[in-house]
Amino acid sequence: MERLWTYLRSHYLSNRAYDGYDDLLDAGAEAWRQITPERLRSVCACDDIMPEEER
């Protein structure tokens, strides 16, 4: 989860100012919608527990 949060923050949420909580919530929801299953797998892949053919 922490890898995903870091990815979302660095690619979609950083270097922006939000007018309020609702704007921040909307930006977070939009960022989440951009994550494809393939991207999720690659961001959250852990070399220690995933077989190489699944990475």
Image (cartoon, rainbow, N blue to C red):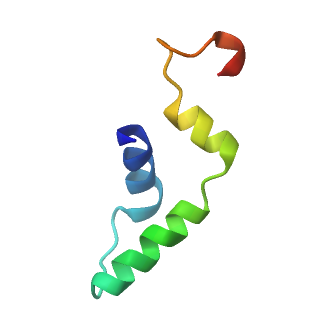
Q: Which residue occupies 28% across, 82% down? A: 21
Residue 12 x/y as whole percent:
46, 61
- As rendered, which of 26 and 12 lies closer to the eye? 26
Residue 6 x/y as whole percent:
37, 46
Q: Residue furthest right?
A: 53
Left or right: residue 41 compared with residue 13: right
Left or right: residue 44 compared with residue 25: right
Q: Which residue occupies 47% across, 11% down? A: 48
Whether residue 37 is situated above or below residue 27 in the rendered picture: above
Q: Quadrant of residue 9?
A: bottom left
Left or right: residue 51 compared with residue 48: right
- As rendered, which of 3 and 1 lies closer to the eye? 1
Q: Quadrant of the C terminus?
A: top right
Q: Which residue occupies 57% across, 16% down? A: 50
Q: Which residue occupies 50% across, 34% down? A: 44
Q: Quadrant of the N terminus?
A: top left
Residue 36 x/y as whole percent:
67, 51
Whether residue 47 is situated above or below residue 20 in the rendered picture: above
Residue 5 x/y as whole percent:
38, 49
Q: How many marks?
A: 0
